[in-house]
């Protein structure tokens, strides 16, 4: 996986790589621990110890190391501040810590017994951010998943559409080119006329050349504006063409056997996501009914936990890889890797917290013991709220986008 | 007002190596103040006097097409980029002297530009092993430009220069190392400027005049190092 991420770009700073891999490794260990927890594989005291160790390291990395490096690299990218890199990085880091604290205040998390730098407080804050993030991502994912996989939504793109669009793109480029040629030619003529002007000393000739150069420069600025507009248009056309190509490829892909398999999976996932949304809604309503089905729900919740783990990891990795390719460049690759590490760490920590929700009571004991007294119910509610909000908004967004696209094509 | 003839030169290279700054420098003779990502393709035009100073002098438009993106892009982006590769008369390969991978990606760029419809990943290249024969029969003139020359500390300059010398041997191309934020590298009269204008002349000749090797303006035969046995990885 690391190979794939770094295939095209040099991440020269080995520290970055180390940080990333450390985060990843510890997150995975945490998941393993949960699974061991449920299965009762190791003795309970060693489990306890491992939990503590894991948590300390992860929190340390997440809160201190990563933001510092992010600040450092972001600042080094801005050319102006190259000299005082370290100073600015520290400043950025302090700002981050300040906001971090501030986040905790409006939420009912603090209990008066604990000190400032205790584990619980740190976890609580990380948890808040992570939960928000997770809810956003999963809400969006739940809606995006069926949208992407189901071929029902794929618009029909024919080859002639693509060709027509490409022709438009090339025409625009040609117009840009011809306008630029005019500019270059005019400039060259002005330059030459300027040279001629130096040779002559007649007064009236100078006046004539001045007026002609003036109209020349007015012309120039007008043409330059046209060129700018055309360039903007060409960029949009390019992006549209890329979209069309991508859709066409998806259509072709869906016709193959693998595509059909994924299509089926997509139906399955969409049903699952829809069910999840409904479950969230119902949980609030049918709170009292849950106690009756406790026995049956144990096994279901165990399976669910497993599925959730697998799919969320997979989904996360895939999204991260795509994201990484989409916005990477040699300048900011360090920053991106660090940001990814941070997001990943927070994601994992908060998913641990959230998994408590799905696990029945006996298993929760050790988790509660390790993590101290946190208001877990708050997290559940918070997660559900954000999840609903993001799911609804992404449905709305996708609907709008879907409606807009065929209109655009009609207009063409 | 395209009353003059034109040649089309592609400017290829990884994302962020400085193609847009380079093109801006070449065409406007000014340093680009605010470089930003190139989406799609940006074109700039330069007027060049072919065979300047001789009675055969003729003026041409040279279009520099600066195509954005990276070799690892999604195939939909690649197929869209292929639109720009039609009727190309010359290629300028840009790589970053501070980033080795960008020079290694140049092989894939060349293949993508020359074989427009095949995906480059199928053909080569994990570590520089490739078929030089493909480039021998390649009719397009190539120019290799290394950017960010100023960012290399003095002690490392030699190894960087040797490495790029190998590169230019592989491509059978001239090479120029410069810094896009400093116009003095391309000031009239420097070796770089001479190489550039010779490259333009070569492209124009290939396009408009019949190919006759004896007539072509002679490039100074670069001293072939005796490092043929040493192939870099």
Image (cartoon, coloured by chain):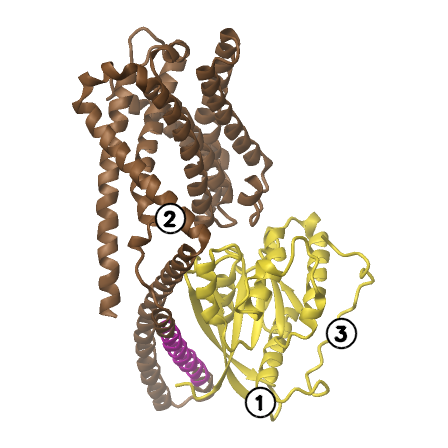
Q: Residue at x 44, y 56 (%)?
A: A256
What residue would you read off at disc 3? Answer: B221
Which mark sits nearer the N-terminus, 3 or 1? 1
Q: Which of label 2 and label 1 is nearer to you?
A: 2
CA neighbours of label 2 inside 10 A, class few (<14), some (14 to 19), many (20+): many
Q: Residue at x 30, y 59 (%)?
A: A155
Question: In the current view of this chain or complex, which residue is farthest to the bottom?
Answer: B55
What residue would you read off at disc 2? Answer: A263
Q: Secondary structure at mark 3?
A: loop
Residue A95 position by quadrant: top left
Q: Residue at x 32, y 67 (%)?
A: A233
Residues under labels 3 and 2: Cα distance?
60 Å
Q: Are marks 3 and 2 on the same chain?
A: no
A98 part of magenta stretch: no
Relative vertical location of residue A64 with respect to residue B92 in this rendering, above or below: above
Q: Secondary structure at mark 2?
A: helix
Position in image of residue A370 (x %, y %)? 42, 11
Labels 2 & 1 near each other (Cβ < 8 A): no
Residue A360 position by quadrant: top left
Q: Are marks 2 and 1 on the same chain?
A: no
**Which chain's residue wears label 2?**
A
Chain B in the picture: what colour? yellow
Residues under labels 3 and 1: Cα distance?
25 Å
Chain A in the picture: what colour? brown
Q: Nearer the viewer, residue A211 or B113?
A: B113
Q: Which of label 3 and label 1 is nearer to you?
A: 3
**Dominant secondary structure of the residues highlighted in magenta in the image:** helix
Q: Secondary structure at mark 1?
A: loop
Left or right: A224 with respect to A338? left
Q: Provide the residue span drawn in magenta.
A: A169-193
Q: Quadrant of the N terminus of chain B?
A: bottom left
Q: Residue at x 25, y 54 (%)?
A: A402
């Amino acid at each position: 996986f690391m190979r794939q991420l770094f295939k095209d770009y040099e991440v020269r700073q080995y520290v970055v790589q180390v940080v990333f891999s450390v985060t990843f490794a510890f997150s995975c260990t945490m998941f393993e621990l949960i699974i061991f927890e449920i299965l009762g594989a190791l003795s309970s005291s060693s489990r306890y110890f491992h939990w503590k160790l894991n948590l300390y390291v992860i929190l340390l990395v997440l809160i201190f190391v990563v933001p510092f490096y992010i600040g450092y690299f972001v600042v080094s990218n801005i050319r102006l501040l190259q000299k005082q890199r370290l100073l600015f990085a520290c400043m950025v880091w302090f700002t981050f810590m300040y906001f971090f604290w501030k986040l905790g205040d409006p939420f009912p998390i603090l209990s008066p017994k604990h000190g400032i730098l205790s584990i619980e407080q740190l976890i609580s804050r990380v948890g808040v951010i992570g939960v928000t993030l997770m809810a956003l991502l999963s809400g969006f994912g739940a809606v995006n998943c069926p949208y992407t996989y189901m071929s029902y939504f794929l618009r029909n793109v024919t080859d002639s559409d693509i060709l027509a669009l490409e022709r438009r793109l090339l025409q625009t480029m040609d117009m840009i080119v011809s306008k630029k040629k005019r500019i270059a030619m005019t400039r060259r003529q002005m330059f030459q006329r300027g040279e001629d002007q130096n040779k002559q000393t007649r007064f009236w000739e100078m006046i004539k050349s001045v007026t002609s150069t003036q109209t020349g420069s007015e012309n120039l600025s007008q043409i330059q504006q046209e060129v700018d507009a055309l360039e903007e248009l060409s960029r949009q056309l390019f992006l549209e063409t890329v979209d069309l190509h991508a859709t066409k490829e998806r259509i072709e892909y869906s016709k193959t056997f693998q595509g059909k398999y994924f299509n089926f999976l997509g139906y399955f996932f969409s049903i699952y996501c829809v069910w999840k949304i409904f479950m969230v809604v119902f949980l609030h309503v049918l709170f009292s009914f849950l106690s009756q089905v406790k026995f049956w729900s144990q096994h279901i919740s165990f399976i669910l936990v497993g599925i959730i783990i697998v799919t969320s990891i997979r989904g996360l990795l895939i999204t991260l890889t795509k994201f990484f390719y989409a916005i990477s460049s040699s300048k900011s690759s360090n920053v991106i890797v660090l940001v990814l590490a941070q997001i990943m760490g927070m994601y994992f920590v908060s998913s641990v917290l959230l998994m408590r929700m799905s696990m029945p009571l006996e298993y929760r004991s050790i988790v509660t013991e390790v993590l101290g007294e946190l208001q877990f119910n708050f997290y559940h509610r918070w997660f559900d709220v954000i999840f609903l909000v993001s799911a609804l908004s992404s449905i709305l967004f996708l609907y709008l986008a879907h409606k807009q696209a065929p209109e655009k094509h009609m207009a063409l | 007002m395209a009353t003059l003839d034109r040649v089309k030169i592609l400017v290829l290279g990884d994302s962020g190596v400085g193609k847009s700054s380079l093109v801006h420098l070449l065409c406007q003779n000014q340093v680009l103040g605010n470089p930003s990502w190139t989406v799609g393709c940006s074109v700039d035009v330069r007027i060049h006097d072919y065979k300047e100073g001789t009675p055969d002098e003729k003026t041409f438009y040279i279009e520099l097409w600066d195509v954005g993106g990276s070799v690892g892009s999604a195939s939909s982006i690649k197929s869209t980029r292929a639109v720009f590769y039609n009727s190309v008369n010359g290629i300028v390969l840009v790589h970053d002297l501070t980033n080795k991978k960008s020079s290694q990606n140049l092989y894939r760029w060349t293949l993508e530009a020359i074989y427009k419809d095949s995906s480059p990943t199928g053909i080569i290249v994990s570590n520089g092993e490739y078929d030089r024969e493909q480039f021998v029969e390649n009719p397009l003139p190539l120019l290799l430009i290394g950017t960010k020359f100023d960012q290399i500390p003095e002690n490392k300059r030699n190894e960087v220069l040797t490495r790029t010398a190998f590169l230019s041997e592989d491509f059978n191309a001239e090479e120029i190392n410069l810094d896009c934020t400093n116009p003095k590298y391309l000031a009239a009269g420097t070796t770089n400027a001479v190489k550039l204008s010779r490259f333009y002349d070569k492209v124009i000749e290939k396009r408009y005049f019949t190919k006759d090797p004896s007539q072509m303006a002679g490039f100074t035969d670069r001293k072939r190092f005796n490092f043929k046995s040493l192939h870099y990885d």
